[in-house]
Image: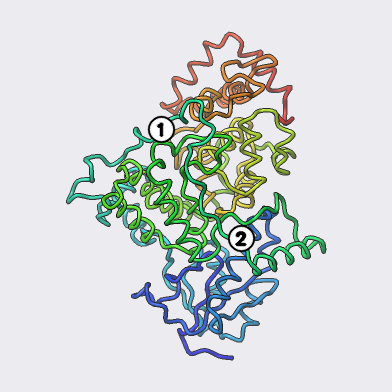
Amino acid sequence: MTSAAGSARWVFGDQLGPHFLGPEEERGRDDADRVLLVESLRALQRRRYHRAKAHLMLSAIRHRAAELGDRAVLVRADTYREGVLASGLAPAALSVCDPTSYGARRLVRALGVHVLPARGFVTSESEFRAWAESRGKRRLLLEDFYRAVRQRTGILMDGEEPVGGRWNFDADNRLSPPRGATTLGLPEPWWPQEDAIDASVRADLDSWEAQGLISLVGDDGPRRFAATRDEALAVLDDFIAHRLPEFGPYEDAALAGDWVMAHSLLSVPLNLGLLDPREVIDRVVQSLAADGVPLSSVEGFVRQVMGWRDYVWHLYWHFGEDYVADSNALSAHEPLPRWWRELDSGAVTARCLSTAIGEVRERGWNHHILRLMVLGNWALQHGYDPRETTEWFTASYVDAYPWVMAANVVGMALYADGGRMATKPYAGGGSYIHRMTDLCRGCAYSPTQRVGPRGCPVTAGYWSFLARNRTALAGNYRMAQPLKGLDRLSDLEEVLLQERERGDAPP
């Protein structure tokens, strides 16, 4: 089978929405008469993926092929290259939106496929390069990027001024959980229902794992995240109707009994390419007037999608392919301990870590505060190797790809790039977790104690981290006060001895 030049589109497993099928100048129009989808076994062998993630990736591809019907050319092969060559579609007749990894970009060019600009983001790569070049030697700060995108797109703008007179409502969006609450009391989210395609995916994963072809980790629970366009739109509708008003105030709060809180669960369908971020942003902004949603919630959501998500995507390319491998400013070389790699939450006494690891084990997801201020903070405190930690996040989270986790883990969580992205390490003690979550409630440790049987390993770990990295952080003006605090600790030596004795044992 052959195809006329430009009439067949190759879509990767994170390019599954309709906006990846139209021509370059009319992204909303679907004019591809054939659509190639390749399932690569090698891709599943590359990492020890969470089972829910492997299931989701295959389920989304197979559902998309089923939707496309006779237009779909679904090939299962060891590698993407073999899949393309076995498809019967001449590479020169294929077009593809630029993929989301360095390796995939090299492959499509080596095969001679016609490459279109990347899609699925608000800001194009050329627009980001122009903005970055305009900065000169100034830092590429998120806040400056976000404001520039607002000005360019007109989103949440009133002429030259931001709607509401403020660019950023962060100060309004830092509420602790309601006192005594176990949940936010919001309706349970809309959940997708598994079907025959999901059953076939589960059977294949079972078979491949039994044959030793792949190795997976994590629970095999029901699929909780959208794998089709229709499901993604249902999740978006549900979020706007039931959780968006509360999203802003409680976006940094966490409750052990409410893993969703007011979060959207849209990172998965966005990163699978099932939704275009502009359509999601437009729907959320419309709710500002139509549904009376607070501006602080709308702006907070827009900042996450149009600001942060685009920002880390562009930094992936801006920092270069060796960014993760070459970033270890704090000389962190500790391997991930077994309890972490195996998601053994039952071995962990500290309730914050047990809850966070348990959520990852159960569904391959938790929201950004548990990722950054519990898991990322712990990895930073204990000097876990940045490359290994980035790989773990990439393999363990259902919404993760190399472009997602490079800057998020290396730059934000671990400060391994020495400040190219973040202005200071995001290290914290138990007091932050106590303030923003209920995870200290009923814990065997006290966030206010550093040593002894009740000494909080997160609090002690914070001071141990500062002591270990005092010289490396001495030139950072934002760390001046915390470093001075070391000199006021009368029990510092006791803290350091305790942490050395704990080693990598489950806390």
For this orientation, the residue located farthest to the right is 211
Question: Disc 1 residue type?
Answer: Arg
Which mark is first along the chain, 1 or 2? 2
| Residue at the disc numbered 1 | 174
- Whole-angstrom CA distance, mark 2 to mark 1, is 32 Å
When the figure is inspected, residue 233 is found, relative to residue 81, above or below; the finding is: above
Secondary structure of the residue carrying tag 2 is: helix
Can you see residue 398? yes
The reply, left or right, for residue 360 in relation to residue 232 is: right
When the figure is inspected, residue 376 is found, relative to residue 479, above or below; the finding is: below
Question: Disc 2 residue type?
Answer: Leu
Residue 470 at x, y percent in the picture: 54, 24
Location of the N terminus by quadrant is bottom right
When the figure is inspected, residue 478 is found, relative to residue 366, above or below; the finding is: above
Residue 259 at x, y percent in the picture: 56, 41
When the figure is inspected, residue 350 is found, relative to residue 493, above or below; the finding is: below
Residue 432 at x, y percent in the picture: 50, 26
- Residue depicted at x 53% and y 25%: 434
The reply, left or right, for residue 70 in relation to residue 78 is: left
For this orientation, the residue located farthest to the top is 490
Q: Looking at the picture, tell me which residue is in the foreground, 479 or 370.
A: 370
For this orientation, the residue located farthest to the left is 159
Tell me whether circle 2 and circle 1 mark residues in contact (CB < 8 Å). Answer: no
- Residue depicted at x 66% and y 40%: 358
Location of the C terminus by quadrant is top right
Can you see residue 410? no
| Residue at the disc numbered 2 | 56
Please rate how many residues cluster around mark 1, counting C-alpha atoms within 10 Å: few if below 14, some from 14 to 19, many from 20.
some
- Residue depicted at x 55% and y 38%: 370
Q: Looking at the picture, tell me which residue is in the foreground, 421 or 99.
A: 99
